[in-house]
Image (tube, helix red, strand yellow):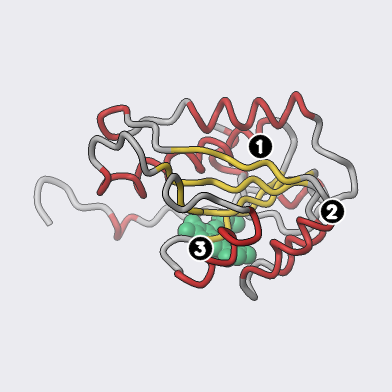
């Protein structure tokens, strides 16, 4: 699939807003992910307000680039009705990857910023976004936008024969 090969972490964006129709497509792709016992442990906060984006970009020194992004999607781990809570990080990894591949498909670029399990980062987002911690935990922050230059999404070959074992380790 083309999107898998050309997806790169895009940290420089044009000023063009991401259309609402595309935001919904990203979230639809995210929610199509597989999850353990189909527990679908995700919720999302869509942030488009420039001042809020600037505030959230201070969550860590590795997120500062995202102050120029036109859109941040906060991925939350739900706490209620979980059938196998220990699998939530894997479920959310699949969900985020789906979202990022759909971004490429829509001509967008994105970067995953790790939040959970960093306590300080989780607390920062809880406070800033008024997250009810009895209901959900901030898990990841995704910066999304139109890449500043088209070639920011480009193929990098990472195939490595040495990582492959057959029949036994
Ligand atoms: C769990 C996770 C956390 C990450 N956190 C950050 C981050 O805080 N800031 C950032 O700029 N990139 C972050 N990244 C992006 C990685 O640096 C990037 O995926 C990696 O260098 C490979 O580059 P590529 O995405 O262009 O293939 C994160 C990626 C993952 C999967």
Labels 1 and 3: the sequence-earlier one: 1
Residue 39 vs 114, above or below: the answer is above
Quarter of the rendering containing residue 45? top right
Labels 1 and 2: the sequence-earlier one: 2
Q: Secondary structure at mark 1?
A: helix
Q: Which mark is residue 94?
A: none
Q: Secondary structure at mark 2?
A: helix
In the image, ligand 1 is in what quadrant?
A: bottom right
Q: Circle 2 is placed at which residue position?
A: 50
Q: Circle 3 is placed at which residue position?
A: 122
The 10 Å Cα crowd at callout 1, few under 14, some 14 to 19, many 20 or more, is many
| Residue at 30 percent of width and 60 percent of height | 162
Q: Circle 1 is placed at which residue position?
A: 103
Between label 1 and label 3, give the one nearer the viewer: 3
| Residue at 79 percent of width and 58 percent of height | 12
Q: Secondary structure at mark 3?
A: helix
Q: Position of residue 118 (x, y in %)?
A: 45, 69
The 10 Å Cα crowd at callout 2, few under 14, some 14 to 19, many 20 or more, is some
Q: Position of residue 131 (x, y in %)?
A: 56, 51
Instruction: Tell me if the residue at label 3 has its CB under 8 Å from ligand 1.
Output: no
Labels 3 and 2: the sequence-earlier one: 2
Instruction: Tell me if the residue at label 1 has its CB under 8 Å from ligand 1.
Output: no
Q: Which quadrant of the rendered structure holds the C terminus? A: bottom left
């Amino acid at each position: 699939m083309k999107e898998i090969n050309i997806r790169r972490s895009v940290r420089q964006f044009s000023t063009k807003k991401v259309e609402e129709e595309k935001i919904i497509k990203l979230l639809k792709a995210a929610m199509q992910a597989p999850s353990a016992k189909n527990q679908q442990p995700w919720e999302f906060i869509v942030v488009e307000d420039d001042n809020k984006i600037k505030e959230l970009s201070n969550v860590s020194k590795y997120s500062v680039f995202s102050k120029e992004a036109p859109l941040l999607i906060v991925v939350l781990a739900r706490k209620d009705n979980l059938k196998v809570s220990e699998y939530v990080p894997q479920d959310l990894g699949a969900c985020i990857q789906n979202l990022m591949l759909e971004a490429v498909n829509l001509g967008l670029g994105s970067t995953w910023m790790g939040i959970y399990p960093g306590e300080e980062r989780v607390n920062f987002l809880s406070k800033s976004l008024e997250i009810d911690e009895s209901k959900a935990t901030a898990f990841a922050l995704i910066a999304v936008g139109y890449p500043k230059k088209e070639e920011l999404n480009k193929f990098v070959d990472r195939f490595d024969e040495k990582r492959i074992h057959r029949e036994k380790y």
